[in-house]
Amino acid sequence: MTKKIPTYFQPIDPRIMDDPDIAAVGAMGEFLYIRALLLIRRNRSYGRIPKRSLGDFGDGIPNARKHAQSLVEVGLWIDEGSYWLVRNWDKWNMTQAEVDQRSEQRREAGRLGGHNSKHSSENPSTRCALCWKQGWNGSVS
Ligand SMILES: [Zn+2]
């Protein structure tokens, strides 16, 4: 699987201006596109840009709606009705399912770490599933 950047920060390809689709939408279209990427990252909306938020993230960009339409026409954004979806978002970014899975793995690792460092057969915790699994709290019957 492709390594994905899981952090709060939004990576932007340093060659973005070489993309012919970006070139086709012009500087203001490119700026709107980048603003949308930042909005997506901030809101953790997994590539989705609510159309109703155009007034916020497009603030200060003349004719923002026209540039949004240009982004759709070149295929950088996909019109999904109430929102736009960034093309290939899931290819480069973690999906919600992947983020949820990673969170569960981290929780599990935390539980295991706590169990390994604090619990033993002489000092089990009745609130620890792993201590119960070890049989340290007696048998579950
Ligand atoms: Zn334990």
Image: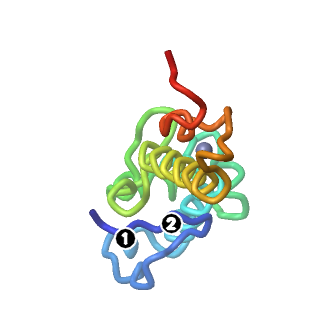
Q: Position of residue 34 (x, y in %)?
A: 55, 67
Tell me the element at label 1. helix
The answer as to whether callout 1 falls within 8 Å of ligand 1 is no
Q: Is residue 45 left or right of residue 123?
A: left
Name which residue type carries label 1.
Ala
Residue 63 appears in the figure = no
Can you name the residue that lies furthest to the top here?
A: 141
Tags 2 and 1 in contact by the CB under 8 Å rule? yes
Name which residue type carries label 2.
Gly
Mark 1 is surrounded, within 10 Å at the Cα level, by few (under 14), some (14 to 19) or many (20 or more) other residues, namely some
Residue 17 position by quadrant = bottom left
Residue at 57% across, 41% down: 51
Q: Earlier in the sequence, mark 2 or mark 1?
A: 1
Tell me the element at label 2. helix
Residue at 65% across, 57% down: 42
Task: Return the residue at label 1.
Answer: 24
Q: Position of residue 2 (x, y in %)?
A: 30, 66
Q: CA distance from mark 2 to mark 1?
A: 9 Å
The answer as to whether callout 2 falls within 8 Å of ligand 1 is no
Q: Position of residue 37 (x, y in %)?
A: 54, 61
Task: Return the residue at label 2.
Answer: 29
